Image: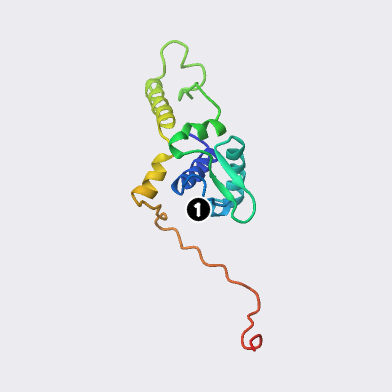
Amino acid sequence: MYGRQTETAIAAMSRLAEVYDAGSTRLSAADIASARQLQGPFVAKILTALSQAGLITGAPGPGGGYALARHPAQIALNDVFALFERENDSLACPFGGGVCGQGEPCPLHHKLVGVKDAMDELLKRTTFEIFREAYQDQGQRPTKPKGQPEKKVRESFRASLGKRGRK
């Protein structure tokens, strides 16, 4: 239904919606990537696009990071979807090119139109407020997928000071 950029953008925006407090709380790209188990550099790239579109604001330096540009109830999933996906009114016909639109539609045509219409409706009517409410008002927290190993804390390879470095 949508690509990796859109999926990552919605995940990042949903995390920012969870902590929304009118811009006081800002999260770094690394914070968002870690919370959503995404690749940091890709999240940073997506956040840049969201910032340029005016959906989020970014501030550099200590105390900086990203926050939603307006209340989550004012940002629809479709606002993000439209940034990364091309509008495509054609449905890929399972019979191949030239069947749908030439006489009778294929057997799946009307069902595919229904799915597309339902997806369009979901994207336009759903705002990021659902993530703020779930997190702040209802106390829901994301869970890690089952079977996923715990991330190990990276060991430091610096020499310890041990007894030699203490006085």
Residue positioned most to the left = 138
For the C terminus, the image quarter is: bottom right
Residue name at image x 39 percent, y 49 percent = 135
Where's residue 28, x and y in %? 57, 52
Q: Which residue is found at the position 41% from the left and 58% from the top?
A: 147
Residue at left offset 49%, top offset 44%:
22
**Residue 164 location, quadrant:** bottom right
At mark 1, the secondary structure is loop
For the residue pair 60 and 95, the one nearer the viewer reads as 60
Judge from the rendering whether residue 44 lies leftward or rightward of residue 73; answer left or right. right
Give the amino acid type for the residue marked by disc 1 in the picture.
Gln
Which residue shows up at 60% across the image and 45% down it? 58
Q: Is residue 6 above or below residue 41?
A: above
Q: Measured from the top left, where is residue 166 in percent x and y?
A: 63, 87
Residues packed near mark 1 inside 10 Å, few (<14), some (14 to 19) or many (20 plus) = few
Between residues 142 and 127, which one lies in front from this camera angle? 127
Tell me the residue that label 1 is attached to.
37
Provide residue 112's location: percent of width, then percent of height: 41, 25
